[in-house]
Image (cartoon, helix red, strand yellow):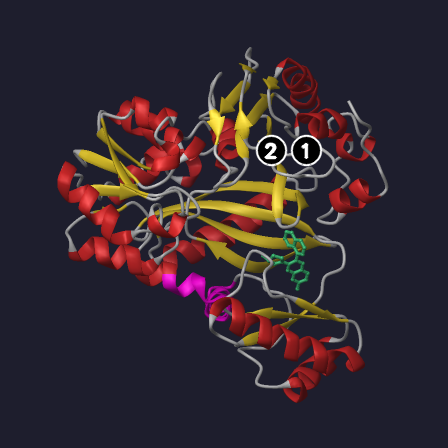
Amino acid sequence: MFDKILIANRGEIALRILRACKELGIATVAVHSTADANAMSVRLADESVCIGPPLVRESYLNIPALIAACEITGADAVHPGYGFLSENANFADVLAEHRIAFIGPKAEHIRLMGDKIEAKRTALRLGIPCVPGSEGGIADPAEALRVAGEIGFPVLIKAAAGGGGRGMKIARSAKDLTYAVQTAQTEAKAAFGDDTVYIEKYLEKPRHIEIQVIGDGRGNAVHLGERDCSLQRRHQTVWEESPSPVLDSAARNRIGEIVANAMREIAYEGVGTVEFLYENGQFYFIEMNTRIQVEHPVTEMITGIDLVIEQIRVAAGSPLSVTQEDIHFNGHAVECRINAEHPQTFRPSPGQISYFHTPGGLGVRVDSAAYQGYTIPPHYDSLVGKLIVHGRNRTECLMRLRRAIDEFVVDGIDTTLPLFRNLVRNPDIQDGMYDIHWLENHLKTGGIEPE
Ligand code: MV4
């Protein structure tokens, strides 16, 4: 096992990783920018190192500063959390050159999944169902037109180096296609320095359902069921739940086994999430994330498995502590991502939290690095914390969630808490009847009243 882990992140995930390290008896190093000197993870870690100014490029993305921080403190492993360097294969390589472990997948798997065309090719080879489309990149509008002839309109042009929704263009008919291909190429070149694009059938009203996996790099891998992440705004999920309201256990086990088998086949190491669109009872692979995700707690709540602890164990060379038969799905969990934003305009609202009271009670979990008197800096994402609620079934979970949201008090800044008070009382949400466009449509049609 590792002796000392450096946590190359900030905010709630830095605290989440720190907690796992403490339980395992591993010493911790928190790194921080000058804007995060008062962070809770800095206070609670055994040691801390300032790695640079507020700009992420000069601090949380500063590889030489992070390597120096490892060498100064003698850390033998780095946990990257999510975002920042968590899916940077080059960082994993540099750490390896310095004999420091990267708590994450092999660099080759990070690289493979970073290229969305290669990821899709691999998924197809491994028997994972994919959206119909081009086999590789498309060179020009003429080639796009030929593929569109086979799969039918509407189609979506995506960037190979994209992901997370950046650089996509819809074409509803042949006359839109030239423009869609050319603008997708131009935008991909500007955003990623790579103009490779591919084409897929555009799914109109899918849900976004992802499968959690963990592998030990020796060919053992298990799936931990799904998370339904359909409730999103501008490609940011705001509410995640497990199980999905639209899957039964047969459908779950079918897609879960396909994904777990694929991970066994490539000897995947670490935690990962295989993302699907789900429409008319069919799963369509879109991409794979090779990191721990923001929404991992809903899976932890229904499986009882600590994903960060498992992640650290397999990175240290231990075999998986569980087999597929050991994994049981118990009850229902929902996570609300509470942001420091105006609940209607979503304008960021950094500043000092004058009063902070978190809910408690049976089945209630709050993952947050905030505290009373803490000032949310303006330089980073606006996540204040995550409220995760578990119940024996979805009805009990929502009943408990309604109560927990009402108990949550964050004064001094705007937060999206009122949005969740509204959502948890909405009939479509209560019925589980929502797709990836539901929230944006709901916000447009003025579903939320001022407090
Ligand atoms: C799609 C799609 C419809 N059809 N692909 C957006 C982010 C990236 N991960 C993939 N995305 C989509 N791919 C096809 N063939 C619709 C989306 C999409 C989306 C997907 C997941 C979560 C939120 C989304 C919001 C808008 C569009």
Q: Position of residue 71 (x, y in %)?
A: 14, 44
Q: Name the mark on residue 196.
A: none
**Residue corresponding to mark 2:** 349
Question: Main SS type for the magenta part?
Answer: helix
**Residue corresponding to mark 1:** 342
Tell me the kind of residue under disc 1: His
Of the 4 image quadrants, the one containing the N terminus is top left
Please report whichever mark, 2 or 1, sits nearer to the chain's N-terminal start: 1
Q: Are marks 2 and 1 in contact (CB under 8 Å)?
A: yes
Tell me the kind of residue under disc 2: Ser
Q: Is residue 78 visible?
A: yes
Which residue occupies the extreme right position in the image? 445
Q: Residue at x 71, y 79 (%)?
A: 179
Q: In the displayed structure, does residue 374 sit left or right of residue 90?
A: right
Magenta residue span: 111-127
Q: In the displayed structure, does residue 259 sit left or right of residue 200?
A: left
- Look at the image and say whether residue 148 sits in the magenta stretch: no
**Displayed quadrant of residue 409:** top right
Circle 2 sits in a helix, a strand or a loop, which is it?
Answer: loop
Q: Position of residue 14 (x, y in %)?
A: 37, 33
Q: Ligand 1: which quarter?
A: bottom right
Question: Up-down: is 118 above or below 97?
Answer: below
Circle 1 sits in a helix, a strand or a loop, which is it?
Answer: loop
CA distance separating discs 2 and 1: 7 Å
Q: In the displayed structure, does residue 262 sit left or right of residue 353?
A: left
Q: Residue at x 54, y 60 (%)?
A: 163
